[in-house]
Image (cartoon, grey):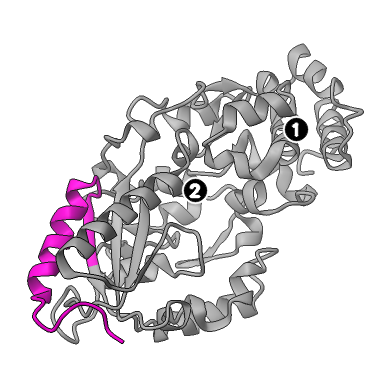
Amino acid sequence: MQSGTSQTDYAALAASVKEWGRALGFQAVGISDTDLGRAETRLLEWLALGNHGAMDYMAKHGAKRSRPGELVPGALRVISLRMDYYPPAAKDGREVLEDGSRAFISRYALGRDYHKVLRNRLEKLAGKIRAEAGDFSYRVFTDSAPVLEVELAHKARLGWRGKHTLLLSQERGSWFFLGEIYTDLPLPPDGAPGAAPEGGRCGTCTRCIEACPTRAIVAPYRLDARRCISYLTIELRGSIPVELRPLIGNRIYGCDDCQQACPWNRFARPSAEADFAVRHGLDDIGLAGLFAWDEAAFKEKMAGSAIYRIGHEQWLRNIAVALGNAPRSAEVVAALRARAHDASPLVREHVDWALRRQNNELPPTT
């Protein structure tokens, strides 16, 4: 049964939703229907190629990812929202990458966990809608369920999919998070009826493809997650493939290279959100010092951070690889030797590789 009342002026409500969303800190709000038929075909092709790697959750939900009405029964519309996240005082990521003794962490993870920030704002927006339209059915998402958020944001006219597969905005580049509200309210979708969403504006540019350290962008608009550094350092739980370790450099959590190379990001703006400000100096911090953190220190410092979810063992695994790629120094070697007998077999394996690489016992590409 559809929520709301027959007297609701849905066009006026849609305008109010956008106004409320901006007042809650979102830079853009759009509304789309739930038809993702074309995207479903591309998703199934991508999964059939095995490009999702060990992310089994990408396949196990079946059609729910591309059919919002099956994920949330009765869903008619999706409200997509965009929030800038680039920390205003963060050290330029390219400078950090140039110093192999420092740790590079994706700029989105330097502050508070975005899941918590966006979910709170989305729930507040849903509360405002309820106060205006009465009870209605909805569910909010922040990269937390089988949702094709880029496709939905594209349909909602918030931007277009870039060749690196991220959403791009002509006004804000790509340094932003996306969130969604699935709802049974028949709000008018953005754009003229039957009109296709905004076409891509990447033209002949291939800078993101060329910038990828591991060549994970195997073709325009197609990412092989198995080679992506974000996947390797965050999603992959086991051993990082030996042949890819040298290419990771000093990236210990995520990778921003494709975004840093994108010309559209010259229009990006720093976030005004205090929650996304840099914490614990993570924008420019030494690898050896981070490797000395015990589990208690990791949990204390990473509490409330997106990094917390990978756990201490995976954190050490990632740093061991980065130390193996770092310029040789007594500090680096000592840090690695201190964990040569770590209780974790996973950590020991990567430390052993790193020490052999530091000692020039491995070919330069392994």
Q: Image quadrant of residue 28?
A: bottom left
213 on left or right of 179: right
Give me the residue at 35% from left, 41% from top.
Answer: 85
Residue 211 — which label?
2
Task: Give 229 or 289, whichever is nearer the viewer.
Answer: 289
Kindly identify which numbered label has been placed on residue 320. 1
Q: Measuring 27% from the left and 84% from the top, which residue is drawn there?
A: 2
The magenta stretch spans which residues? Answer: 1-30
- In the picture, measured across the screen, residue 325 lies left or right of residue 302, that is right
Q: Is residue 31 magenta?
A: no
Which amino acid type corresponds to the residue marked 1 in the rendered image?
Ala
Task: Look at the numbered disc 1 and give the secondary structure of its residue.
Answer: helix
Label 2 to label 1: alpha-carbon separation: 24 Å
Amino acid type, residue under disc 2 in the picture: Ala
**Residue located at (61% from left, 27% from top):** 300
Near mark 1 (Cα within 10 A), the count class, few <14, some 14-19 or many ≥20, is: many
Does residue 198 show up? no
